[in-house]
Amino acid sequence: MLKQMNFKKILILSDGVPGHVNQARGLVSWLCDSYGLKQSDVVTEMTLVLKHKPLRAVYRACLNAKLGFASTLIRSGYQNIPPELEKGTLIISCGGNTSFANAALAQDSGQPNIFIGSLRGLRSDCFKAVMSIEPIAGADNNIVMDFAPSYIDVNEIEVAGERFAESHQPQQPLWCLLIGGNGAGYEFDEQDWQVLAHGMNELARRYSVRWLVSTSRRSGEIAERVLQVQAADVIYEGIWFSGQGNQSLKSYLGAASRIFCTEDSMTMLSESINAGKPVVSVRPRKSHPNQRFLDALLRFEMNGYLQRCALSEMDRLSFDVEAVQHHPQASKAKVIEQVTRLLNTA
């Protein structure tokens, strides 16, 4: 276990991409919760900037060849990389632009490291553990997760949801809708948003619920305008990226009995699954995710973490009003057990 190994610090290397750093923070949260560590005492986060992206192939080749000067070369390619690491530091990062720094720091300091994501040609033994949704062929230190780590904590959102219910006193059950936008092979247009609004109206009528809505940077003004006009009667409250609404997303996830999420964001899907509520992913007409993304979605569906649905089918969805919640804690525990085993391996 982490405590038994006398780790004094956990260093998160961030590339500034919210979806990446939130996965790293999520794993750190899992570790700290499991081992009774206070994050404010042990966690340091540094945002790195990869200065020369065309040199990634050179960095990769040097690390794969275990060249002695690889660490020095790669350090020079980043802004804000720490000069040295304290003994007893665990390095964690997510996202390809952090992978070289992660591996170089571990090589230079002899400290263990964990990388979350695709290796993109890097040897797996550049890391103590590599975590991914899809299996990585030939990687003995690959931990295949049921879903990505998230900062979402079931107990925290339950408390936030209870506070929301106490202060708002909703008269009907609430469902939550997380909205992304164009990306990962998905394209939304105004017609898609209109179909979404129609589906929200129909489900609200059939199941006597109201919606808690949260949009994102990629949603756009058209999406917000369509929903605010065409689904106004069934939206209980919203956190609009354009600036309206001041609730926390944890309150919405906690107060909702069911979560809907557009299918374009693995981060939003993972946060929804981590909340332990029944999840429905909805997709627009133009949906062409790559095979790796699609395989992850199919695995989520097969394991019962979500139900997939086209927007055009949303108004015909059918399920029990009494939603059956899943329990992500078992999957988290499995991941922590595997991380512990690899970190304890010489």
Image (cartoon, rainbow, N blue to C red):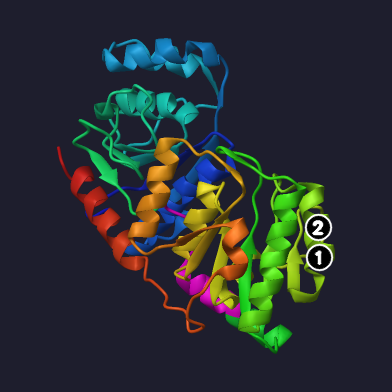
The spot of residue 258 in percent (x, y) is: 54, 73
Which residue is pictured at 43% across the width and 57% down the height?
29
Q: Quadrant of the N terminus?
A: bottom left
On screen, 205 above or below 315? below
Locate residue 102: give its quadrant.
top left
User: Along the line of sight, which residue is nearer the eye, 224 or 33?
Assistant: 224
How far apart in space, not on screen, are marks 2 and 1 (Cα)?
A: 6 Å
Where residue 323 sits in the image (x, y, percent)?
Answer: 47, 79
Is the C-beta separation of discs 2 and 1 under 8 Å?
A: yes
- The answer to which image quadrant residue 205 occupies is bottom right
Pointer 2: residues within 10 angstroms few (<14), some, or many (20+)?
some
- Give the magenta part as a residue range: 148-161
Q: Position of residue 223 (x, y in %)?
A: 76, 52
Secondary structure under the numbered disc 1 in the rendered image: helix
Residue 109 locus on image (x, y percent): 32, 27
Observer-nearest of 231 and 58? 231
Query: Tag 2: residue type?
Result: Val
> As rendered, which of 279 and 26 lies closer to the eye?
279
Could you tell me if residue 82 is visible in this image? no
Question: Disc 2 on helix, strand or loop?
Answer: helix
Residue type indicated by callout 1: Gln
> Could you tell whether 223 is left or right of 204 in the image?
right
**Mark 1, residue position:** 230
Q: Which residue is mark 2?
A: 226
Write the residue at 42% across / 78% down: 324
Label 1 crowding class (10 Å Cα cut-off): few <14, some 14-19, many 20+? some
* Residue 70 falls inside the magenta stretch: no
**Image: 66 above or below 87:** above
